[in-house]
Image (cartoon, grey):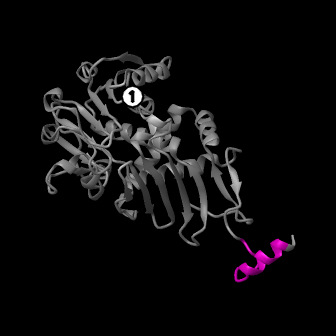
Amino acid sequence: MTLSPSHKALVPFVSVDNMMKLVHHIGIEPMLRGLADYIEADFRRWELFDKTPRIASHSEEGVIELMPTSDGEVYGFKYVNGHPKNTREGLQTVTAFGLLANVGNGYPVLLSEMTVLTALRTAATSAMVAKYLAPKGADTMAMIGNGAQSEFQTLAMKAICGLKSVRLYDIDSAATAKAARNLRGLGLEVVSCTSPEESMEGAQIITTCTADKQYATILTDNMVGAGVHINAIGGDCPGKTELAPGVLHRSTIFVEYPEQTRIEGEIQQLDHDHPVTEMWQVINGTAKGRTRANEITLFDSVGFAIEDFSALRYVRDHIAGTDLFLELDLLADPDDPRDLFGMLQRAAKA
């Protein structure tokens, strides 16, 4: 993978506007499939990457995080926040941007918005995992929590797993109406439900994605029947969970990076030595996924830096040959690398 800045040291920048244009240029379902392929490829080479739990700054209002990683050739990081109260103020709960850099010289080679891209990569990761863990022939999903992620999650399951029907539920009926409206005409049966129990009728996949930063019980033990796959993506920071402990004890649990998930995921409710399986091992064949029809599989997803790296890598590869980026004068580039001050002086004369 060759990354190098241009001779003028200009850095490609993908704005929100250009990211949306890129999605429509490629098509949202093909892009979700493509992102899933990149993520799966990087999971297969998981052991090459630097790995660390994200660096988090918590407050009463939310959290701000940095998520870094490197495969030895390219370095990447994402800045992301999570502030559940923001929706009450007309703001996004999650915003993000990310960067790729050349390890060889430290120069950044891509800067990108990642608010839209994070929604896409989170959905692609969910569906990529469900491809391995969901029961055979699963075609109906309960989507509990109908906020900003819900449509992306649904379309990724359609594009990658063959989902045919989604059953929507949110404590806020306006959110359900929004999701149903947005999904109309996209090749799915969309059913709006008035309770989480109703949404799970006939569903083989259950996705939970709520925003409140608290220990919540979105799924109680008696709500979950045998043989389903649970895609738990809302519990993603300390003190924020969605599932009753009983559900966890009945499930075979799969995670991205245990050192992070034990701090932030549903399994923060369990003993630190409770067994979990890392998804990269399932993907490369060194660990088993679903082993029986009546097994409850649980993907305790909190998001990990390698997924963001994969998404940025995908964007870098797919903006080539397009006009869907700007070039930023982000790097000082004096004629003599030792004469930064002289460059500054000459700018005054210019």
| Residue on which the image places disc 1 | 146
Task: Identify the amino acid type marked 1.
Answer: Asn
294 left or right, relative to 311: left
Q: Residue at x 37, y 31 (%)?
A: 161
Estimate how packed mark 1 is, as few (under 14), some (14 to 19) or many (20 or more) residues with alpha carbons within 10 Å: many
Q: Is residue 211 above or below residue 302?
A: above
Residue 21 image offset from top left, x and y in percent = 63, 37
Residue 238 image offset from top left, x and y in percent = 28, 51
Camera-nearest residue between 215 and 17: 215
Q: Residue at x 40, y 22 (%)?
A: 176
Tell me if residue 296 is in the magenta stretch: no
Q: Is residue 62 above or below residue 201?
A: below
Residue sticking out furthest to the right: 349
277 left or right, relative to 162: left
Residue 206 image offset from top left, x and y in percent = 28, 30
Quarter of the figure with the N terminus: bottom right
Tell me if residue 339 is in the magenta stretch: yes
* Segment colored magenta: 333-348
